Amino acid sequence: MTVLTALLHAISDNPLDSFALLVFFFCWLGYEPFLQKISKKSGFIVKDLSVVRSAWMREATLREIKLFDSNLMAHAVNSAANFSSANLLLIAAVGGVLFSGQVPLTTAKNLGFDVSTVLLFQMKLGLIVICLVRGLLDFIWATRQMNYTAAAMGSLPDRMDERTGREFAAAITNIVEPAMSSFSQGVRGYYFGLASAAWLFGPVPLIVASIGAIFLLGWRQSRSQSARGIRRLRELLEEHPYPTAPREFDTAPAQNTDKNAAPHNSKSKMT
């Protein structure tokens, strides 16, 4: 309780820092529910990608050779693992400064950081660690769910009819969708991790960085070139018939072979 009391006292002595911290938590914790609420329709990457992944699972269930799908899942797992490793390194770096017991105030001042009190400076470093830890947990959970998806895709039976394929696709979509959502939340944590680092320069930079992260994420979700491309892809997939008709093999080479073989056979008969 002594530590908690000291933290509350340090915040209460700096009302602008308290307000900046409230703005940050409002943006950080409120962005995901707000995004889910406004993305009920198309126009946002988070919603359009959900349709794309659902179409992927529908096609994967009926695809005879699933090497392409397994490569995609392996890439997703590797990406989550790489981000997890990066998070661990950042947590170790910031945590080493925070828990070493020797805060380099002189160096921090030379870098332009706001170090009015040692305890407040430690709180700022602690906020960065909290953001990184939350992102690490998201990546770990995403990796586990991706492995669940890989196991589910490996268990798909061959030669399913359309109705059975839809049922299996719906089941796997319920696994892969939260996995990719957790991965996106982990990546999104870097935005707010950088915003929390802005607190080192003072409460005003924290407020500006928190609101700026919201606008940047919102623009990339709805107005970026990738968002427009994924939106168009969703429209094409919704117009595309399911299941995809198998491609007919070109029989022209075989016919040419038969024609070429005819003179040879006739010559052999004459001899």
Image (cartoon, helix red, strand yellow):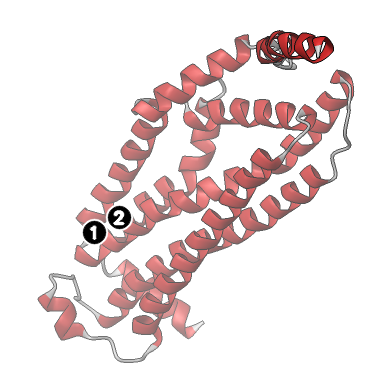
Q: Secondary structure at mark 1?
A: helix
Where on the picture, by quarter, is residue 143? Answer: bottom right
Provide residue 189's location: percent of width, then percent of height: 44, 54
Q: Which mark is residue 244?
A: none
Provide residue 178's location: percent of width, then percent of height: 66, 43
Residue drawn at x 49%, y 61% as measured from the top left: 82
Residue drawn at x 49%, y 34% as measured from the top left: 35
The quadrant of the image that shows the C terminus is top right
Left or right position of 205 against 158: left
Left or right position of 161 against 176: right
Residue drawn at x 47%, y 17% as measured from the top left: 232
Q: Relative to 195, is 128 above or below?
A: below
Q: Callout 2: few (<14), some (14-19), or many (20+) C-alpha neighbours within 10 Å? A: many
Q: Which mark is residue 203?
A: 1
Where on the picture, by quarter, is residue 33? Answer: top right
Q: Nearer the viewer, residue 107 or 181?
A: 181
Where on the picture, by quarter, is residue 122? Answer: bottom left
Q: Nearer the viewer, residue 133 or 151?
A: 151
Q: Amino acid at mark 1?
A: Pro
Q: Say whether marks 1 and 2 touch (CB < 8 Å).
A: yes
Q: Secondary structure at mark 2?
A: helix
Residue drawn at x 24%, y 48% as measured from the top left: 208
Left or right position of 150 against 187: right
Q: Nearer the viewer, residue 267 or 271?
A: 271
Q: Which residue is mark 2?
A: 20
